[in-house]
Amino acid sequence: MRQAATLILLATTALCGTAGAGTIAGAQDGGYRTQDGDFLLVESKDHLIGVQGLDCKNPVVVSGRLRAKNCWANGHLGGDVDVSWRVDGNIIVSEGKRYILSPPLPPIDFVALKAPADPFIGTPDAWEHNRSGVAVDPDKGTIRYLRPRPDLKSVVKTGAVLYEGSLKPGRMIFGTAYAFKDGCKPASYPVRGSYSKHNEVLTLTGPGPVRRGCEVVAYSYDSPHSKLVFEYIVGD
């Protein structure tokens, strides 16, 4: 159940495309995330902060601590929150973690979702991404590296998860992608996408991580990881 309520609200914020309109507890509106995928949500309109799996109304910051007594989890009273809190531009530092403001995801293509579903479903292990062989498995909801291209073999291992989330053709595709860098831990970030060309091309888009060394310092659509294209290589 950890972070479930926060995740739902963060997804809602991303779906609606809202971010940065106001401030609460010194932080801009929007969804924040750590490099390992932990979430935090700020919504000044509702005087709400989503933190530690709880949605807290009317938080107060005093002497570097954020406190709230009106906190909920999945519609039930979830207790109080008392955490360290420091805002530095688009970064919130809380309980030793750095949460970075993430731009909203692109709008949902409702026209494409209403279109008749294409019956073709590709073989999971017959896909390619940037000259690496990958397995796109809608049933498991994962994309994994099968045959990393030669220059990536020190960066990613066979079986490494590149994406996890929804993957069913004809439905909204929304989940978490992972960016890899040699000597660094994978950086997670949210993506949304769709199939095209009779389900033989899958495109995922989201604000990718920007690193300084191994540290993620921002999420941006200028990141080289912001657009991921997967192509079915043995289609008719």
Image (tube, rainbow, N blue to C red):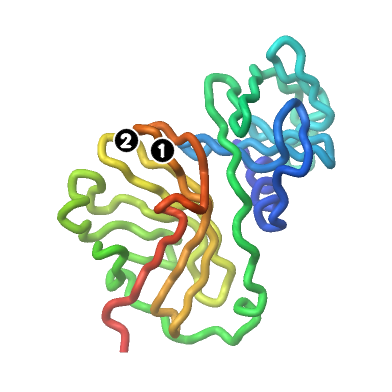
How far across and down, in percent of the image, does residue 36 sit?
46, 36
The residue to which callout 2 is attached is 184
Instruction: Please give left or right for residue 59 compared with residue 85 in the image.
Output: right
Residue at image coords 23%, 53%: 158
How far across and down, in percent of the image, does residue 6 sit?
67, 40
Residue at image coords 43%, 85%: 120
Residue 211 is marked as: 1
- Mark 1 crowd level (few <14, some 14–19, many ≥20, 10 Å Cα): some
Residue type beneath disc 1: Arg
Residue 169 visible? The answer is: yes
- How far apart are the two marked residues, 1 and 2, measured between alpha carbons? 10 Å
Residue type beneath disc 2: Cys
Does 59 sit above or below residue 135? above
Residue at image coords 62%, 76%: 113
Residue 196 is marked as: none
**Quadrant, the N terminus:** top right
How far across and down, in percent of the image, does residue 17 sit?
69, 55
Instruction: Please give left or right for residue 154 compared with residue 219 in the image.
Output: left
- Mark 2 crowd level (few <14, some 14–19, many ≥20, 10 Å Cα): few
